[in-house]
């Protein structure tokens, strides 16, 4: 497959180039053909990047990065918060599928961050907003709060999966990014 043996730097460049194509496109140029469906079914997946992002329906990593089937391993959860389920998914994609890059992708106008800033939700949503509050502290600016939330998730991945050791060996890289819903532009935070 064309994504085998891609370095973290090459994966990051592919995401940046894909986002630029997305900004200029009217349709998604990612390969979703019958051939790629068959190939990934028969040969398995080799995604060049892992993307942890919000469940927001306006944030579609495959479109944002002009990616097709088998290119991205996407983990979605409201507020792109991390717990052992998300960490296990990252561990699987990095360890078993060989993905060299992990991107935590926050976004503008995030409902989960907004709820953490302005309300006291109940039910299971509270577990999400509690995690976001740990990340943002007293921050009141929504964009800065979103970025702090991304940075906390990046730190959690690095700390729990011994990423610095893997990075030092030229393997896995973890970075944060912020998606501007209005323009479509992805701003990498690292």
Image (cartoon, helix red, strand yellow):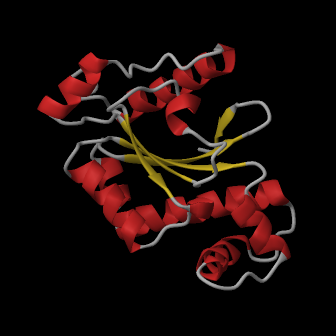
- In the image, residue 183 sits, relative to residue 131, either above or below, namely above
Q: Where, quadrant-wise, is the C terminus in this rendering?
A: top right
Q: Position of residue 153 (x, y in %)?
A: 54, 63
Relative side of 168 to 54, left or right: left
* Residue in the image at 77% along x and 30% along y: 183
Relative side of 104 to 20, left or right: left
* Residue in the image at 69% along x and 85% along y: 122
Q: Position of residue 136 (x, y in %)?
A: 72, 71
Relative side of 25 to 86, left or right: right
Q: Residue furthest front?
A: 34
* Residue in the image at 81% along x and 76% along y: 138
Depth check, front residue: 73 or 170: 73
- In the image, residue 156 sits, relative to residue 72, either above or below, namely below
Quadrant of res 126: bottom right
- In the image, residue 81 sits, relative to residue 15, either above or below, namely below
Q: How many marks?
A: 0
Depth check, front residue: 52 or 55: 55
- In the image, residue 176 sits, relative to residue 138, either above or below, namely above
Q: Position of residue 112 (x, y in %)?
A: 70, 65
* Residue in the image at 41% along x and 30% along y: 11
Q: Where, quadrant-wise, is the N terminus in this rendering?
A: top left
Q: Position of residue 83 (x, y in %)?
A: 45, 72
Q: Residue furthest left?
A: 42
Quadrant of res 132: bottom right
């Amino acid at each position: 497959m064309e994504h085998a043996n891609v370095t973290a730097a090459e994966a990051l460049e592919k995401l940046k180039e894909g986002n630029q194509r997305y900004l200029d496109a009217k349709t998604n140029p990612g390969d979703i053909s019958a051939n790629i469906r068959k190939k990934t079914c028969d040969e398995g997946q080799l995604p060049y990047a892992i993307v942890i992002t919000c469940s927001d329906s306006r944030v579609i990593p495959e479109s944002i990065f002009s990616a097709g089937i088998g290119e991205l391993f996407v983990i979605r959860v409201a507020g792109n918060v991390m717990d052992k389920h998300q960490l296990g998914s990252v561990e699987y994609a990095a360890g078993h599928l060989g993905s060299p890059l992990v991107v935590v992708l926050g976004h503008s106008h995030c409902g989960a961050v907004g709820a953490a800033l302005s309300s006291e939700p109940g039910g299971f949503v509270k577990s999400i907003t509690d995690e976001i509050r740990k990340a943002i502290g007293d921050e009141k600016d929504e964009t800065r709060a979103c970025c702090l939330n991304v940075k906390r998730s990046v730190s959690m991945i690095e700390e729990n999966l011994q990423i610095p050791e893997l990075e030092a060996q030229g393997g896995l890289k973890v970075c944060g990014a912020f998606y501007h819903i209005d323009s479509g532009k992805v701003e990498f935070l690292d």
